[in-house]
Image (spheres, helix red, strand yellow):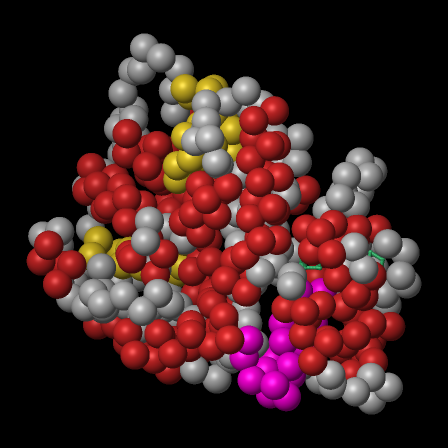
């Protein structure tokens, strides 16, 4: 928890200028929540003033506050457009508001099931838990210098991302294994359900330590943020290097450990920056360096890097506000189609899932970067 005097300072530094509503200089909408719901309370500025009212005691808790507090993908776009000193803390403040809202009202029904599934099955989908049987399935060693942390979405839904990651790591002869991992806790942290995350972090730390690893690689942008930034912020540090697969692949390419096939047909691709890799972790270039090494033609969408339009799935919004989430993803699909690319690449299984759900006519191939790397090596 943050000192209340610090939060007070952050809240006072919002001058209600409205910059967080638009991509700076372009006047394109930048906040998917405000763009859909239109009311001031659905933009960052409004949420900060709700926080201010709650903090001062001028605003009493009421369930009409729940939608403005939870219908935010925590995409961080507002943080990149705002020029005031509190800019880096806007999402932290919104997440703090969610924590307080859960204390008042309990979790939203759509979010409560995350906690229930994670408690019973150790993953956010309630699927049968994979423990160590995957080690045998993929003929991996019990101990290794690198642990591949798969994450719930790649492990139980977008399994081709898991399989492609394992395939590429094997091709590069990386000394790696997988462990009995539990959900990293991201779905809980993003939806105000903080308490269970300590046990999840403790379990994951001990599984990784038992494998004797010095590095954790994750193919999920959400896991990457949680295992590094969130665990660290909450004193739950894994005490080990955590890197995203795009950074790991970039290094393997630089070391000459991955060779790409010649392709007679150059694929035209465009790239969607996941919020949790780009804006939340400032990693925009590693995926692009990998794509630039591949036999593909990359055409950027106009809204790229820190100005990327969110896929609509984050912050628990795909489950709690499916209609708005889908509309947000639809808009991103339209951005991709403007580039005339045949393939939309991302680096997060959750983005892949949200964007695939929105591509009604399946006119775009939507894949993860690691699948593209596996195909071309
Ligand atoms: S959050 Fe930042 S950009 Fe938005 S209104 Fe406040 S000061 Fe302006
Ligand atoms: S995090 Fe994203 S959705 Fe939430 S207020 Fe900021 S720009 Fe809007």
The residue under the point 43% across, 31% down is 362
Is residue 100 magenta-colored? yes
Q: In which quarter of the image is residue 15?
A: bottom right
Is 214 in front, or is 265? 265
Q: Position of residue 203 (x, y in %)?
A: 31, 77
Is 112 in front, or is 341? 112
Q: Where is residue 351 in the image (x, y as percent from the top left)?
A: 48, 47
Does residue 221 appear left or right of residue 337 in this picture? left
Q: How many labels does the image show?
A: 0
Quarter holding the N terminus is: bottom right
Looking at the image, can residue 332 be seen? yes
The residue under the point 23% across, 68% down is 129
Does residue 85 appear left or right of residue 77 in this picture? right
Of all residues shown, which one is farthest toward the top? 264
Q: In which quarter of the image is residue 368?
A: top left
Q: Where is residue 279 in the image (x, y as percent from the top left)?
A: 61, 51
Looking at the image, can residue 291 be seen? no
The residue under the point 29% across, 26% down is 376
Is 59 in front, or is 134? 59
* Magenta region, main secondary structure: helix
Vertical arrangement, residue 317 with respect to residue 344, above or below: below
Quarter holding the C terminus is: top left
The residue under the point 42% across, 74% down is 113
In magenta, the rendered stretch is 89-108
Q: Where is residue 193 in the image (x, y as percent from the top left)?
A: 51, 79
Picture quarter with ligand 2: bottom right
């Amino acid at each position: 928890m943050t000192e209340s005097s610090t939060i007070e300072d952050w809240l006072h530094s919002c001058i209600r200028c409205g910059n967080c509503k638009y991509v700076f200089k372009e006047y394109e909408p930048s906040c998917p929540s405000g763009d859909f719901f239109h009311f001031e309370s659905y933009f960052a500025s409004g949420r900060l003033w709700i926080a201010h009212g709650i903090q001062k005691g001028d605003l009493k808790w009421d369930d009409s506050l729940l939608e403005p507090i939870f219908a935010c993908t925590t995409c961080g776009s507002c943080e990149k457009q705002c020029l005031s000193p509190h800019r880096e803390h806007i999402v932290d403040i919104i997440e703090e508001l969610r924590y307080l809202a859960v204390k008042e009202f309990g979790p939203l029904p759509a979010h409560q099931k995350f906690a229930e599934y994670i408690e019973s099955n150790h993953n956010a989908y309630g699927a049968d838990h994979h423990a160590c049987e995957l080690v045998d399935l993929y003929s991996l060693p019990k101990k290794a210098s690198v642990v591949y942390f798969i994450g719930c979405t790649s492990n139980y839904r977008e399994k081709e991302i898991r399989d492609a990651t394992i395939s590429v790591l094997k091709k590069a002869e990386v000394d790696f294994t997988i462990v009995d991992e539990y959900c990293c806790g991201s779905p809980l942290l993003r939806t105000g359900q903080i308490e269970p995350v300590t046990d999840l972090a403790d379990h994951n730390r001990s599984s990784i330590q038992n494998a004797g690893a010095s590095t954790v690689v994750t193919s999920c942008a959400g896991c990457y943020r949680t295992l590094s930034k969130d665990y660290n912020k909450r004193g739950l540090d894994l005490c080990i290097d955590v890197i995203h697969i795009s950074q790991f692949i970039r290094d393997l390419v630089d070391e000459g450990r991955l060779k790409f096939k010649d392709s007679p047909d150059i694929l035209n691709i465009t790239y969607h920056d996941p919020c949790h890799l780009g804006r939340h972790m400032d990693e925009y270039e590693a995926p692009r360096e990998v794509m630039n090494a591949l036999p593909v033609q990359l055409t950027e969408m106009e809204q790229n890097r820190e100005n990327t339009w969110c896929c609509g799935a984050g912050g628990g919004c795909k489950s709690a506000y499916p209609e708005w989430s889908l509309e947000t993803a639809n808009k991103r699909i339209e951005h991709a189609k403007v580039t005339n690319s045949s393939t939309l690449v991302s680096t997060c299984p959750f983005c892949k899932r949200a964007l695939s759900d929105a591509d009604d006519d399946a006119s775009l191939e939507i894949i993860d970067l690691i699948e593209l790397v596996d195909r071309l090596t």
